[in-house]
Image (cartoon, rainbow, N blue to C red):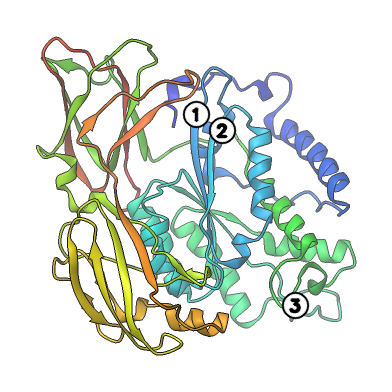
Amino acid sequence: MSHDRTVPQECPLRRHAPWAASLAILAFWASISSQAATGYRSPAPPEDSQYGAKIQRTMRLLATSTPKHRNKVKILFYGQSITAQKWWKDVADDLRKRFPHADLQIENRAIGGFASQLLVRTTEHDLYPYYPDLLIFHVYGDHRRYEDIIRSVRQRTTAEIAIWTDHLAANEKANEAGEYIDEGWTAFMAKWLLENARKYDCEIIDIRPEWKRYLKDNNLTPPDLLRDSVHLNDHGCFLLAELIKRRLVYKPDIPADPNNTVKTYIVGEDVAWEDGRLTLEFTGNRVDVVTAESTGASSSARVLVDGKKPSAFPEAYAITRPSSIHNIWPAVIRVSWSKPLLLEDWTCRILESDEMGSRFTFEVVGLKTGPDGRGRSDEPFVSNSGRVVIDPNDWHLKRTCEYAKKPVPENFEIKWKVVPMFADRYDRPRIDDPTREYAATLIQGISNTRHTLELIVEPGVTALIRAIRVYRPPLE
């Protein structure tokens, strides 16, 4: 992230022509390049220009990165099999080419075959701990669980959210006039997505009307862009990438963060050291410290939040996604806890199971906790320490074994880790690249309420800290 003060007062694109015209020229040449590279015809220019307003904090960080100041930007693609298809790599590559100076971290954690009612469970491991700047999201399934995910992202992160409407499936037919009319569930979801994008202040990438126009302009039918009933073929991946890429644009006339969800406090200006202590009252659920650009030595600083070490907050610990079975799906889709966690590795051993994992017994062992109890797959499980809680509906062995047509492996084990989203001490990192911004998270995942941060150093010692950055999710 970059503080507003680092942003140039004038965007270079505006010096010679209005930004919209400049972007149109860039989009034109990009479309020519894409068509030449793939052999597919690029989609017609969008008919509306009212897009991009909800992702301008991310786009501004990308666009204002320079060779001397590379803003770090985290982007997460999340959803199911459509999101996992290769088009997302074209979008990621396009962002890297258009914004070569940005310090981009892009991941795709989509899980094929996981509709919203399953994905709402895995978000606990995949999404909230990652805490992206921009979430690019699409999923099928229960619209209520879809909304649960969006609402939780708004409550637990400051991520900007871009969601896109469904493309046309193979069974959709044009009427006698050659028009594709949304009906039934398709019509409901098309309207629902638009309404909930407005409700939760998300960027909506409405590809559905543009998909229809592309079919008509190129004398195609829905199956021409698909490899089965719904998954995209190469042509379909090309089209989806093109429709999404051109929505990820910087519009300098639009406020980047109108709700002040991410605020940077410059040390020495907005907050200051007094007698070896820096104190900041803040509202939010995450705090980062930005290292000063200096080659000098510095000692570490003790960290307190509300008078406690960050490690004392149980919610500042994250559990990684449990390992898969048959390299397909997580063997258990959510592991939670009822008592405070330790930073440790966990193993769940399957003891006795029927062939396809319908019913089994198991035991859990923590690297620090040790043997922590046994359970049955058809019963709620709480380990002896309370550090492992598994709902019987979250086991995923049976579905995976049936899909793979393979039995539960002998001596099968499931692994996960408990990792920190905190630091009790701030130790200045080694600066290998002075153009990058080095930020360390002091605490993340705590309640989105009022807190007090204290950094403490020994008398006469200077901690080389440039800024404190606070993240305040828009929903409580």
Q: Is the residue under label 1 in contact with that under label 3 (CB below 8 Å)?
A: no
- Marked residue nearer the N-terminal end (3 or 1): 1
Residue 71, numbered circle: 1
On screen, residue 5 versus residue 456, left or right, reads right
On screen, residue 42 versus residue 138, left or right, reads right
Q: Is the residue under label 2 in contact with that under label 1 (CB below 8 Å)?
A: yes
Where residue 302 sits in the image (x, y, percent)? 16, 28
- Marked residue nearer the N-terminal end (1 or 2): 2
Where residue 256 sits in the image (x, y, percent)? 49, 35
Spatial separation of the CA atoms under disc 3 and disc 2: 37 Å
- Marked residue nearer the N-terminal end (3 or 2): 2
Looking at the image, residue 22 lies above or below residue 269: below
Where is mark 2, residue-wise?
62
Q: Looking at the image, which residue is at 37% across and 77% down?
A: 395
Check disc 1 and report its element: helix, strand or loop: loop
For disc 3, the neighbor class at 10 Å (few under 14, some 14 to 19, many from 20) is some
Where residue 385 sits in the image (x, y, percent)? 14, 66
**Which quadrant of the figure has residue 425?**
top left
Where is mark 3, residue-wise?
170
- Identified by mark 1, the residue type is Asn
For disc 1, the neighbor class at 10 Å (few under 14, some 14 to 19, many from 20) is many
Looking at the image, residue 358 lies above or below residue 115: below
For disc 2, the neighbor class at 10 Å (few under 14, some 14 to 19, many from 20) is many
- Identified by mark 3, the residue type is Ala
